[in-house]
Amino acid sequence: MERDMTANFVPKGVAHVPVPQVVEPVRMTFVLLPNFSLIAFSSAIEPLRIANQLAGQALFEWDVLSEGGEAVGCSNGLKVQVDGPLRETKQKAMVFVCAGVEPEKSASRRVADWLRQQWRQGRTVGGLCTGAYALAKAGILEGRRFTLHWENLPPFVETFGHLQPLEQLYCIDGRILTAAGGAAATDLFIEIVARNYGDRLADAVLKMCLHGQQRPADLRQRMSLSSTLGIRNPVLVEVIRQFEENLEAGVDIGALATELGVSRRQVERLFQRYVGMSPKQYLNGLRLERARALLTETDLPVADVAYGCGFNATNTFTKAFRQRYGVSPRRLSNRHAAT
């Protein structure tokens, strides 16, 4: 049974923004994948609902689908009812796939084929949180600017080596729209409101969302290293940045120290003072974090993960991994494959 969009999604409200009577609302279809991010989905759909409320008319209409039409569990354990299975959408509908954890597994071949069909029929196609996995499987991201949640960037690049995602809040590249998840979906959808109905309505939606101010698309998802770590020493921040960007090849600390105008010993003292460990220990920690992400988000063999994260021997990697996480890399990988 189809929902009455006007009754359900044009609720009464005190605030009002006059908008000329709309002949045809902007239509959207959201596809929820297993373990999708509820915050990304709600952050996208609420600006649409608020825009309708402020205007007192259906500026936006949407339906929500899943692959087989069943309720979909999100990453926090809740289940969301949908309107039906994958099906033909309205001719001008924008299509968004919302994913979350384990995106490579949740984006099935059927979903990818359906997305490719929507793309070939001229529709705008988007991905929320890790929805870019499904778009990549559909083969529609080549040569495009796109993004996904920063936590999933390393495994995505390992899986789709020919694609290079951007670590920014959201991207609009022609008919490809992607948001990194969380509140970034609100930024994207407020821009969609602005492009369709003007800045005045978009600003009012922004205020209703208590979103502060509209953030630019190219804003980095994460704060600067100095803010994240609470460190302002420029030498230490630069060394850590080099570590993060060169996990596989490693960094010659002596050469880098010379380049930065300090001694190797000074770098070691900075690490002990600010992070309580040696540079080598810090680098190994970063490598193990990357390895864990690859083991849980990709199907790469343990040996490939070890070498790809900068470990020269699998047994050394296994020992360090077990010591840090209490489980061997192979067992964690097998556990991931079995779910």
Image: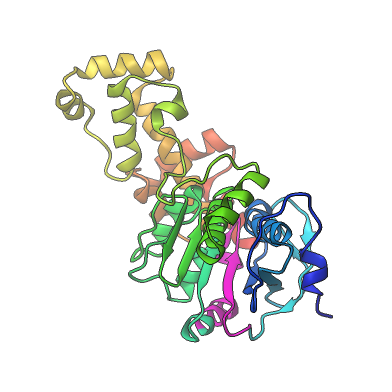
Q: Is residue 103 magenta?
A: yes
x and y percentages locating residue 171 in the rendered image? 43, 59
x and y percentages locating residue 107 in the rendered image? 57, 69
x and y percentages locating residue 128 in the rendered image? 56, 60
How many discs appear? 0
**Where's the N terminus, which quadrant?**
bottom right
Q: Is residue 7 above or below residue 248?
A: below
Q: Is residue 256 left or right of residue 101?
A: left
x and y percentages locating residue 14 in the rendered image? 78, 49
Instruction: Determine the image quadrant of residue 223.
Output: top left
- What residue appears at the point 56 percent right and 78 percent down from the top-left corner? 109
Q: Is residue 86 left or right of residue 225?
A: right
Q: Is residue 91 above or below residue 48?
A: below
Instruction: Determine the image quadrant of residue 233.
Output: top left
Q: Is residue 251 left or right of residue 189?
A: left
Q: Is residue 26 left or right of residue 125?
A: right
Say which of 122 and 287 sits in front: 122
Residue 113 visible: yes
Q: Is residue 48 above or below residue 107?
A: above
Look at the image and name its color scheme.
rainbow
Instruction: Determine the image quadrant of residue 113.
Output: bottom right
**Where's the C terminus, which quadrant?**
bottom right
Q: Is residue 219 above or below residue 334?
A: above
- What residue appears at the point 56 percent right and 64 percent down from the top-left corner? 197
Say which of 143 and 191 sits in front: 191
Q: Is residue 101 magenta?
A: yes
- What residue appears at the point 32 percent right and 13 percent down from the top-left corner? 269
Residue 298 visible: no
Write the start and end of the magenta stretch as one range.
Answer: 90-116
Say which of 219 and 102 sits in front: 219
Say which of 300 and 64 sits in front: 64
